[in-house]
Image (spheres, helix red, strand yellow):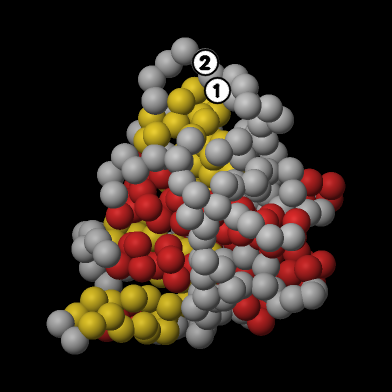
């Protein structure tokens, strides 16, 4: 008998908000997943032996815009992943940020149903990663509030800071208690992104706040830097050990050129980060190219 790991709660969001990407000889198919249909995954091309990536966008985003498309295409470049995206765009539209914050609980509750649906159809929790950008990172964490088991791995891409830092309690924000491994990549810490150490292992990239390739007015530089977290992580999906981090003190962003390096071995950021590593790591990407965003 299949084990139902979803807590017995009622939701109204879902159905047509999940996409699965199937590779075939004729190209990539973008399919809707209906978790109310037991055969939905079976007919989609889902392969239980593969790893699973669940990708969640942030405020004023959608699964069909950057940086989510950058993440999706990086996973599509491999053959060992089932790729799912969660589109909560109607509940996260600009300029209604407060409404988006309120809607996070509903989205996380329904995405937990998707997670349980994948597990009930042969998915392996130990091979499943929730990857969230900005508010999506916090939603990844909130999913665990609606499961009877802890998630295995979460990657938080510059988890959102505005109002979360002031009003978000443990229930509404990503913490290291939400999965056995919580990795966080900081690229706009202290502005649009969270500060200091959030997960088991955090990477403070290029000082953690403004990325070298981001130009223009203050808000554009902040948004560009915020999106860079997805680009850097996507690079690690495509190329092993693409970015290495050195142990450093837990403050992020770094306020000076002295990043506070500590003794210890460098570790790869992103896809190849070893399980069980803890602490803050500083990454110098040596890159001046910015991440395209819409």
Would residue 105 appear left or right of 143 to someone viewing this image?
Answer: right
Instruction: Work out which residue is located at the far top of the displayed protein and give it.
Output: 263
Q: Earlier in the sequence, mark 1 or mark 2?
A: 1
Q: Residue at x 27, y 72 (%)?
A: 46
Contact, CB < 8 Å: mark 1 with mark 2?
yes
User: What element does badge 2 sit on?
Assistant: loop
Who is closer to the viewer here, 217 or 108? 217
**Quick one: quadrant of the N terminus?**
bottom left
Residue 47 picture location, percent across and down: 23, 68
Q: Which mark is residue 42?
A: none
Residue 234 picture location, percent across and down: 40, 56
Q: Residue at x 31, y 40 (%)?
A: 241
Would residue 258 appear left or right of 200 to someone viewing this image?
Answer: right
Q: Which residue is mark 2?
A: 262
Who is closer to the viewer here, 168 or 158? 158
Would residue 268 appear left or right of 160 to someone viewing this image?
Answer: left
Instruction: Work out which residue is located at the far right of the displayed protein and give it.
Output: 166
* Residue 141 in view (yes/no): no
Q: Residues within 10 Å of mark 2 (few under 14, many from 20)?
A: few
Say which quarter of the image contains residue 178: top right
Who is closer to the viewer here, 103 or 266? 266
Residue 157 picture location, percent across and down: 55, 51
What's the distance in space between the residues labelled 1 and 2, CA to CA? 5 Å
Instruction: Work out which residue is located at the far left of the displayed protein and give it.
Output: 25
Q: Which residue is mark 1?
A: 248
Say which quarter of the image contains residue 195: top right
Who is closer to the viewer here, 100 or 142? 100
Residue 211 picture location, percent across and down: 59, 47
């Amino acid at each position: 008998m299949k084990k139902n790991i979803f807590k017995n709660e009622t939701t109204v969001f879902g159905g047509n908000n999940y996409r699965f990407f199937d590779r075939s000889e004729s190209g990539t198919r973008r399919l809707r997943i209906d978790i109310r249909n037991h055969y939905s995954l079976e007919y989609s091309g889902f392969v239980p032996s593969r790893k699973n990536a669940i990708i969640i966008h942030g405020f004023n985003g959608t699964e069909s815009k950057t940086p989510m498309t950058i993440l999706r295409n990086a996973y599509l470049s491999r053959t060992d992943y089932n790729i799912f995206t969660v589109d909560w765009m109607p509940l996260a539209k600009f300029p209604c940020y407060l409404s988006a914050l309120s809607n996070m609980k509903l989205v996380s509750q329904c995405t937990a149903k998707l997670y349980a649906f994948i597990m009930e159809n042969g998915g392996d929790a130990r091979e499943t990663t929730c990857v969230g950008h900005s508010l999506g990172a916090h939603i990844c964490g909130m999913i665990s509030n609606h499961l009877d088991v802890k998630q295995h791995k979460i990657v938080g891409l510059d988890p959102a800071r505005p109002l979360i830092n002031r009003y978000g309690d443990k229930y509404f924000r990503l913490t290291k208690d939400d999965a056995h491994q919580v990795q966080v990549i900081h690229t706009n810490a202290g502005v649009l992104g969270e500060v200091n150490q959030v997960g088991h292992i955090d990477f403070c990239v290029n000082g953690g706040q403004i990325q070298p390739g981001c130009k223009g007015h203050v808000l554009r530089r902040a948004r560009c830097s915020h999106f860079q977290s997805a680009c850097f992580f996507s690079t690690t999906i495509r190329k092993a050990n693409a970015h290495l981090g050195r142990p450093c003190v837990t403050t992020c962003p770094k306020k000076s050129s002295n990043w506070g390096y500590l003794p210890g071995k460098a570790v790869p950021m992103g896809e190849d980060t070893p399980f069980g590593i803890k602490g803050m790591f500083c990454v110098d990407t040596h890159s001046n190219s910015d991440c395209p965003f819409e």
